[in-house]
Image (cartoon, helix red, strand yellow):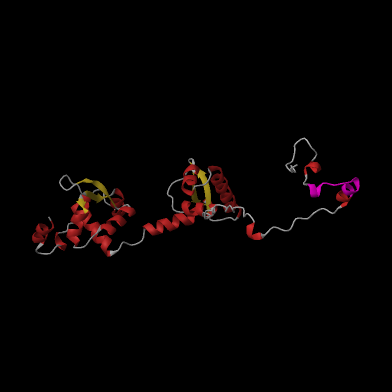
Amino acid sequence: MADDSRPRKDLPAWMTLPGSLIPSSPEDLQDAAEAPERVDPPEDPRFEVQEPVIEAPPHEAPGPELKPALEAILMVVDEPVREVTLAQVLERPTHEVAAALRELSAEYEASARGFDLRQVAGGWRYYSRPAYAPLVERFVRDGQQARLTQAALETLAVVAYRQPVSRARVAAVRGVSSDGVMRTLVARGLVEEAGTDPESQAVLYRTSSYFLERLGLNDVSELPELAPFLPDDVENIEETTK
C-alpha cells in the first residue's frame, strides 16, 4: 500500500508531517516542546532587498533679507509706495512686508536717525526729520544759487535771445551739443518748455518767470541789446544757423 504523505486539512498539523517526523509517544512530544527554538541562519546580504531612497527636493536659494531689500527700494522712490506693490516686487506676503516696514520705522525712531520712514497717502517713503529742516533748506537753497558754468551761460543766452528755440537750434548756434546743459537749466527753473515746432515737431524752450525774477526784469524785451557784442559777419552766422 502506497504511503500517502500529502497533508490533510482535517488532521492536526503534527499528524500531517512525514513519517520520520511523526512523534511515536507522549515523551517525544514533550521533548519536542522542550527543544530550543530554532534560529534561522542570517540572510546573505547579497540578496537583501534594498528599499528605494527618496531624495528630498532641492531647496530654492534663499532670497534677499526683507528689511535690507525694502530699504534699497525705498531709497530710490520719489513718491510713497504701497505695501502690496512692495510685496509683489519682493515676492513676499503683504502682511510680512507691512510688519517689516513698521519695524524699520520704529528702529529709525529709536535710533534718532536724521530721517523717518512714514506711511503717507497709502504708501511708504523716507522723509527727513522736521528737526533738520533748516539744514536741508539751506543745502537746497545754496545748491540752486551755485554759479552757472560757461556752457550753461552760453546756452541760457541763446534761449533768452532766440526763444522759443529748440535744442538743435541751440546746438547749431553754440557749435556743440547742449542737451545736458539744457536739462540743467530746466532743473534750475531758468528754462521751460514752450510747445513744439509745427514743422519739425521738436520741443521748443523759453526762459521762465524765475529767470526774469533773478535778473530783475519785467519782460524779455528789457534784455540788453546784443548788437554791440556781435561780430561784423553776424548776417552770415544767421544764415548758417537757420
Residue found 20% across the figure and 59% down from its top: 171
Q: Is residue 163 visible to the viewer in this orientation of the structure? A: no
Give how far across and how far down residue 77 sits, in percent: 44, 50
* Left-right relation of 206 to 66: left
Query: Is residue 182 something one can see in this rendering?
Result: yes
Residue 226 or residue 9, whichever sits in front: 9
Q: Is residue 88 magenta?
A: no
**In-image side of 74 versus 2 (left or right):** left
- Name the residue nearer the viewer: 192 or 78: 78
Judged from this view, the residue extending furthest toward the right is 27
Front residue of 187 and 101? 101
In percent of width and height, residue 238 lies at 11, 58
Residue 31, position as x, y percentages in the image: 88, 51
Residue 216 place in picture, x, y as percent: 29, 53
> What span is colored magenta in the figure?
19-30
Say whether residue 21 is magenta. Answer: yes
Front residue of this view, candidates 202 and 99: 99
Q: Is residue 87 left or right of residue 5?
A: left
Quarter of the figure that contains the N terminus: top right
Quadrant location of residue 149? bottom left
Residue drawn at (26%, 48%) of the image: 193
